[in-house]
Amino acid sequence: MYPSVAICAKAGTGLCVAIFILCAIASKSVMAQDCPTCDLDWAESAKVDDVRRLFATGVSPNGRSWSGGRLSFLIAYKNPDPATLEVFFEEAERLQEPLVLVEGKAPNSIWNTALHHAARNDHTGMLKLLLEKGLSPHWTDDKYATPLMAAIAHSQNIETYLILLDAGADPNARDGLGWTAAHLVARFGRNPDVLDVLFEHGLVLDAQSDSGLSPLEIAVEYNSQEMQERFRALLEGN
């Protein structure tokens, strides 16, 4: 166990991180590149100055939290302020090392991206920043889901969808089950207007999943009458 973790194991998250950073600065020691006291609560509440102070103690912008997750991924997932992630880019540039925002189990096998994390939580500012920095809306996670799919499954925010669609996201991409955005809206969507937005961006409404299910069949099983009627109207060209 890291000494700092043992010292503040019973302290609150914010106090624990503060103790860890202050002790490192006071002793003028160089911390490990990881931050064993950083967690989701830290990521959610972190401000720009908090991130800068953390890096000043020797933590790497590519460092990991106590659970093994990348700090940059936690920020993209829990923090709505893109300025906090900008500090990661600045520090990585200062150190002349690339900021890791995509991870895979093997070469060319991506299973996690910061873009997916931002999309799930409607962090639109984060999404715009990550796309500007070159992350692709076509990359998939371990279930072969795109960031757009992640957004649809967890969010009802049309702005999030539009940011990804305007960046070139394919609404007809298929995940590991052969589901497209249409299937996901049929299962998780609560706002029929979402369907109109995706349809305007080329969504195919009658795509069959690997098991032969159509989006309308899924909507009939799981969704509201209003959503079912919107599917039928678009399929009939009304």
Image (cartoon, grey):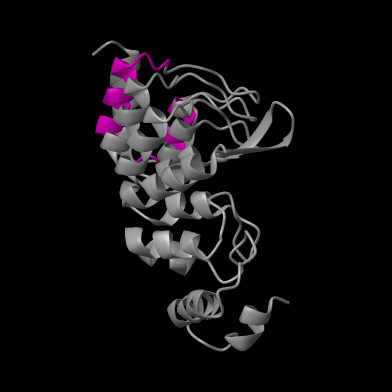
Camera-side residue: 153 or 160?
Answer: 160
Height in image: 72 above or below 10?
Answer: above
Residue sitting at the far right: 106
Camera-side residue: 40 or 60?
Answer: 60
Q: Position of residue 129 (x, y in %)?
A: 36, 36
Residue displayed at 33% across by 16% down: 201
Camera-side residue: 49 or 234?
Answer: 49
Residue sitting at the far front: 28
Residue displayed at 53% across by 55% down: 71
Whether residue 87 is visible to the viewer of this picture, yes or no, is yes
Q: Which residues are magenta?
A: 182-204
Residue displayed at 47% across by 38% down: 115
Image quarter for residue 33?
bottom right
The question of residue 192 being in magenta is answered with yes
Q: Position of residue 92 (x, y in %)?
A: 50, 43
Check the picture and name the quadrant holding the N terminus: bottom right
Whether residue 47 is visible to the viewer of this picture, yes or no, is no
Height in image: 173 above or below 130?
Answer: above
